[in-house]
Image: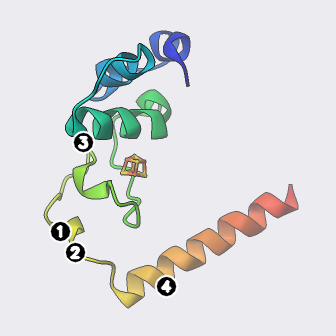
Amino acid sequence: MNIKDICTYGVTAQGRAELIKFYKSENLTRKEAILAKCYECNNGYVDGKMDCKVFSCPLYGYMPYNPNKDAVKKPMTDEQRKAASERMTRVRSAQTRK
Ligand code: SF4
């Protein structure tokens, strides 16, 4: 994603201005950097301003569209870790089949 992509495809959402600021080599605060990263990670929220639900991401507790910020500051349970591992295995096997 670059400035042109952001302006063409990226929706107006938290992190847009911050990501543009980053690409202009301006300094970001920690909060702005997190917002910019989540905006980039979600491809400019082209599919909607939604919770990414990546509980294993260290930034998830600060994700702007995470509806339950307090709950995610806890480490993953064994059950959640196992479910995440199974999801990754499915994704990886789907990628190798292509
Ligand atoms: S919290 Fe979600 S959107 Fe933000 S960087 Fe992590 S995975 Fe990407």
Q: Earlier in the sequence, mark 1 or mark 3?
A: 3
Q: In the image, 30: left or right of 10? A: left
SS label for mark 4: helix
- Looking at the image, which is closer to me, 43 or 33? 33
The amino acid sitting under disc 1 is: Ala
Residue 61 horizontal/vertical position (percent)? 24, 57
The residue identified by callout 4 is: 82
Residue sitting at x 41%, y 59%:
54
The residue identified by callout 1 is: 71
Q: Earlier in the sequence, mark 4 or mark 1?
A: 1
The amino acid sitting under disc 4 is: Lys
The residue identified by callout 3 is: 64
Query: Residue 53 sits in which quadrant?
Result: bottom left
Q: Earlier in the sequence, mark 3 or mark 4?
A: 3
Q: Residues within 10 Å of mark 2 (few under 14, many from 20)?
A: few
The amino acid sitting under disc 3 is: Pro
Mark 4–mark 1 CB contact (< 8 Å): no
- Looking at the image, which is closer to me, 24 or 82? 24
Measure the C-alpha gap from mark 3 to mark 4: 26 Å
